[in-house]
Image: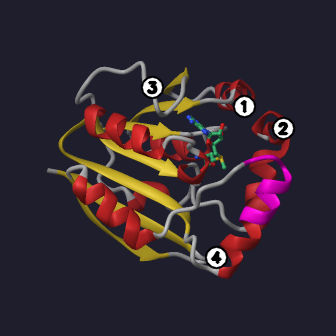
C-alpha cells in the first residue's frame, strides 16, 4: 500500500489533519541529544521535526518508497530499510522509541515488542500513537485499509498497556483527537 501512497503521503496526512509532526518534539520532551528510533517512520515527517529539535534520529521502515521520500528531505537522521520485527540494531541503543500510526500495520506485534525491549535502554521511553480499535472511526479506517489489501490490527489501548506491562514496559495513555491515543511507557 505504501509503495503507492509514498508520493502523496505527506500531503494526504496534512489534509486529513492527523499530522502530529509539529507536536511530537513537545510530546516526547526532552529529546535534545536523545537517541530516538522512529519505527515505521515512513517519509520521516516526525523524524524531521525531532532532528530539528536536537534528537539523534534513526528511521526504520519496511517500505523503500517511503524511505526514499525521507532521504529526499536531507534531514540529519540515519535511515534504515528493515522490518520492525527484525531490527539490525544493537541492544540498549535508544533512549526513545516512537511508533506513530504504524503499530496497526505490524504483522507480528509480539515480535516488535521483543525488539523494542531489546533496543531500549533501561528507563528508556516508548511512545505509540495509533487509532483506538474500539472507536467507530477506526472501524471505518480498518474497512478501507482492508479494501487496499492492508490487514490492519488496530490496538485497544487498555490491552496494549497490559501487554506492554507484561513485557517489562510500564505505561499509560491519553486520548488524542480523531479517535487516536498516545501511549507512553518506560522500560523497567
Ligand atoms: C501510516 S505510515 C506512518 C509513517 C510515519 N510513522 C508517520 O507517522 O507519518 C506506516 C508506516 O509503517 C511502515 N511499516 C508497516 N509495517 C512495517 C514493518 N513490519 N516494519 C517497519 N515498517 C513497517 C509502512 O511502510 C509505513 O511507512
Q: Distance between the residues labelled 3 and 2?
A: 26 Å
First of labels 3, 2 by sequence position: 2
User: Are the residues at dot 2 and dot 1 in contact (C-beta closer than 8 Å)?
Assistant: yes
Magenta segment boundaries in residue numbering: 142-150
Q: Which of 11 and 51 is in front in this view?
A: 11
Label 1: element kind: helix
Find numbered disc 2 in the image and state the secondary structure of the residue it sits on: helix
Choose the circle earlier in sequence order: 4 or 3: 3
Q: In which quarter of the image is the N terminus?
A: top right
Residue on which the image places disc 2: 7
Nearer the observer, 54 or 140:
140
Q: In terms of sequence position, does the residue under pointer 2 or pointer 4 come before the other?
A: 2
User: How far is the residue under mark 2 from the one under mark 4?
Assistant: 24 Å
Label 1: which residue?
A: 69
Residue labelled 1 has its Cβ within 8 Å of some atom of ligand 1: no
User: Looking at the image, is 144 positioned above or below residue 77?
Assistant: below
Q: Give coordinates of residue 37: x percent, y percent.
A: 41, 36
- Mark 2: C-beta under 8 Å from nearest atom of ligand 1: no
For the residues carrying marks 3 and 2, which lies nearer the camera in this image?
Answer: 3
Q: Residue at x 49, y 39 (%)?
A: 39
Which is nearer the N-term, disc 3 or disc 1? 1
**Tag 3 near tag 1, CB within 8 Å:** no
Judging by the rendered image, the residue that carries numbered circle 4 is 178
> In the figure, is residue 173 to the left or right of 30?
right
Q: Which of marks 4 and 1 is nearer the N terminus?
A: 1
Q: Give the mark, 2 or 1, whose residue is nearer the N terminus.
A: 2
Amino acid at each position: 500500500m505504501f509503495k503507492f501512497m509514498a508520493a502523496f503521503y505527506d500531503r494526504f496526512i496534512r489534509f486529513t489533519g492527523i499530522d502530529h509532526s509539529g507536536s511530537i518534539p513537545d510530546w516526547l520532551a526532552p529529546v535534545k541529544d536523545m537517541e530516538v528510533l522512529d519505527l515505521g517512520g515512513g517519509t520521516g515527517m516526525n523524524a524531521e521535526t525531532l532532528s530539528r529539535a536536537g534528537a539523534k534520529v534513526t528511521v526504520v521502515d519496511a517500505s523503500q518508497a517511503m524511505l526514499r521520500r525521507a532521504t529526499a528531505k536531507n534531514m540529519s537522521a540515519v535511515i534504515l530499510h528493515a522490518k520492525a520485527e527484525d531490527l539490525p540494531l544493537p541492544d540498549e541503543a535508544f533512549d526513545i522509541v516512537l511508533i506513530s500510526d504504524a503499530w496497526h500495520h505490524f504483522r507480528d506485534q509480539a515480535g516488535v515488542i521483543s525488539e523494542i525491549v531489546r533496543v531500549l535502554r533501561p528507563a528508556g521511553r516508548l511512545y505509540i500513537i495509533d487509532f483506538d480499535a474500539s472507536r467507530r472511526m477506526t472501524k471505518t479506517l480498518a474497512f478501507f485499509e482492508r479494501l487496499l489489501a492492508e490487514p490492519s490490527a488496530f490496538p485497544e489501548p487498555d490491552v496494549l498497556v497490559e501487554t506492554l506491562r507484561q513485557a517489562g514496559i510500564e505505561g499509560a495513555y491519553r486520548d488524542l483527537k480523531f479517535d487516536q491515543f498516545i501511549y507512553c511507557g518506560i522500560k523497567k
